Amino acid sequence: MTNTLFKIKKVNELLLKKFGLPKRAEKLPHPIDLLIATILSQNTNDNNSYKAFQNLKNKFPDWHDLLKVKRTHIEKLIRVAGLAEQKSTAIKNFIVSLYKERGKVSLDYLVNYSNEAAIENLTQFKGIGVKTASCVLLFAMNRNICPVDTHVHRTVNRIGIVSTSTPDKTFSLLNKNLPDETAHSFHTNLIRLGREVCKPKNPSCGICPLNTICNYALKNLSNKKENKKRDFMLLDNV
Ligand code: SF4
């Protein structure tokens, strides 16, 4: 067993003890719903991106309708999520390009793709990065793949599971070593750890379940404050 694999298993086990098994939606979300929700979630909180998603979905329950809609109309509907011009451009471009390539607005063809091929395919669309593509695979297609956002990148580097300079490098190393059926709990509990305990500034190492195995040189064991618990996780509620 590699050292990375061993550490992932240990961290997953300790986080499961602390936070429990994260809930999953009973029915897998539609991949395009999930992809659009992930674009909307960039640089904002889950509540605002959820509102923006609902505004868009209520107006256009069938994503084919976005083919005819002006980008600026999408921008108005998603304004609450911030970066509305950039996000509406990515959404409009994705829907139009997908339709041009496949003749329909559907990601069903990805069922036959490996994780690597699916990521490569989705990241061809302008505005779709590795994080968004891997969220579609984990949350909407139930693949064992761990998306890396800012919380996952920060925490796994502090703990010492990887030592990398960018989320995409972290993604590549983590996913080469991910044990089967670990991705959803590992990803979701690391985000919770990053929001509630291992915050960017002044982490609460004094109450962290990982403090005996964490390599972070600036551990703050005297900080025992936990951020208020926030159960709502957007991508499990699309
Ligand atoms: S011990 Fe501190 S730095 Fe390490 S994971 Fe826990 S909160 Fe983060």
Image (tube, grey):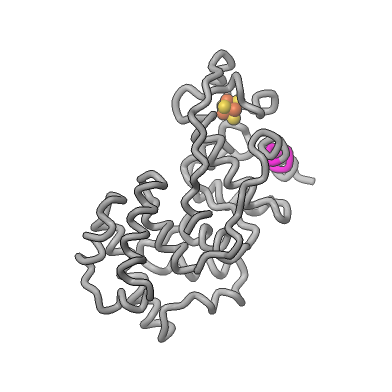
Say which residue appears at 45% left-offset and 69% top-offset: 32
Q: Specify whether 33 is left or right of 215.
A: left
Q: Quadrant of residue 103?
A: bottom left
Q: Report the residue at 62% width, 47% height from top.
A: 22
Residue 182: x and y, percent? 69, 51
Q: Please tell me in which quarter of the rendered image ligand 1 is found.
A: top right
Location of residue 188 in the rendering, given as x and y in whole percent from the top left corner: 57, 46
Most common secondary structure along the magenta stretch: helix
Which residue appears at 62% of the width and 34% of the height? 160
Image-quadrant location for residue 85? bottom left
- Residue 130 visible at all: no
Confirm whether the magenta stretch covers residue 11: yes
Name the residue at the bottom extreme: 103
Q: Is 33 above or below relative to 197? A: below
Q: Is residue 154 above or below residue 25?
A: above
Where does residue 131 sit, x and y in percent of width and height?
48, 55
Furthest-top residue in this view? 222
Q: Is residue 177 magenta?
A: no
Q: Is residue 222 above or below residue 94?
A: above
Residue 69 versus residue 221: which sits nearer the camera?
A: 69
Magenta part of the protein: which range? 7-12
